[in-house]
Amino acid sequence: MRNSLYRTVHIGITAALLIALSLACACSQTALPPSATTTPADPPSGAIDVPRELERALLDRKLVAQSLNNPRGMHRLASGALLVAEAGTGDPDNPLTGALTELSDRNADGDYLDEGERRVLLADQPSKNILKIVRRDEVFGMAGIAEGKGQVLVARAFFGGPSHIFAIEGDATRPWGETHLNINDLAYDPPRDAWVGVASTTDEVVRLVPGGGVERILKLPPLPNGQDSVPGYLRHDPVTGKVLVSLFTGSPEGEEGGEGTELVPRAGGIIALDPATRSFTWAVTGLTVPTDFEIASDGSIYVLEFCDAFLDPVGTREAMYQGASHGGFKRFSGRLLRVDRKSGQVTIVAEGLDAPSNLALADGALYVAEGMGTPGRLIPAPGGVRKLTGYIERIELPAP
């Protein structure tokens, strides 16, 4: 995502947002028709606002995979295997550490921790750490995974672009498309029979074109205090028929300005986009740097908050190894929230997550990818210091 996951800041939720749609786009983008007009966002009363104080209804969690290199997108196959996109280590001396990995629970013990339960489908993928740009330990590479219309696609995206999209076909992958944008996440939109994606570097939602290129759906304008919106993840919403998009929000200092720690709590949110009219309304406000989300069968939204503070910025790899450091993100401060759209109630269902970036819903459970950053370096953790590692937890959802 734009500062990968993560450019921090402040959304003035109470102000109206105007969608400024450009009539021209570069290279592989297609110009918008004249009918694409600006539309104001909902007033605060039109969205569910997350209260400052929340009730806890914590759900059971289980570690199901570990020792992963920056796990990102996940997808559960009909066989029960779990596909995982690994962004890699971000080590400039070993740049091809990204992978698409398949995890299989061969002994049926409910996890993927045993020998022989992991195999690589796509190896030697590029991996980059952008700490010199954003002063935070952020790794880019393999990204979101989604299924639609009988296909499973996975994105490989880099800060500022480009992105490559691959189709997963059994044990093989093949090129599906590419673009100069950074497609951090993608989803299938059934009502319009289209693949859509978010380009967080340029604050765009786009339609992905098979074979290459994109068509812009909307360009999000700067938010009221000048910060970028940073669309991070998206899903088709079966409740409204629209596309929901999480806004991580960006820094008012710009990507290379400030110290990399400018975080304003409760500045992010989720918008509901109508691709047909290229307009949006607020669905959820008051979130703190939201990343991925899923929509349960009852219409509830489960959404991740990445962290609650940005601490210990780093500008060099050497600085990361001078002792235990948060590296820009407050470790183990992430949360998973449940937003009940019928009642408006918001509850904490998991807390103490370590920089959770991605979420996947399958078989009555949520899979959470955690551990953004450089594997092996020391980080502050509950009860002491530990080595950073990527891992996946499974959270069982209550029966509907």
Image (cartoon, rainbow, N blue to C red):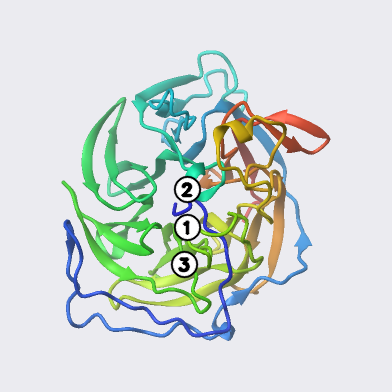
How packed is label 1: few (under 14 Cα within 10 Å), some, or many (20 or more)? many
Instruction: Please tell me which residue is depicted at 48% across the width and 52% down the height of the picture.
Output: 3
Which quadrant of the structure image shows residue 9? bottom right
Nearest the camera: 398 or 35?
35
Disc 2 residue type?
Ile
Q: Disc 1 marks which residue?
A: 255
> Contact (CB < 8 A) between labels 1 and 2?
yes
Q: Disc 2 marks which residue?
A: 133
Query: Image quadrant for the C terminus?
Result: bottom right
Which tag is nearer the camera, tag 3 or tag 2?
2
Residue 390 can be seen in this image: no
Image side of residue 283 versus residue 397, left or right: left
List x then y, in percent, for residue 82.
47, 33
Which tag is nearer the camera, tag 1 or tag 3?
1
Residue 229 - label:
3
- For the residues labelled 1 and 2, the Cα–Cα distance comes to 7 Å
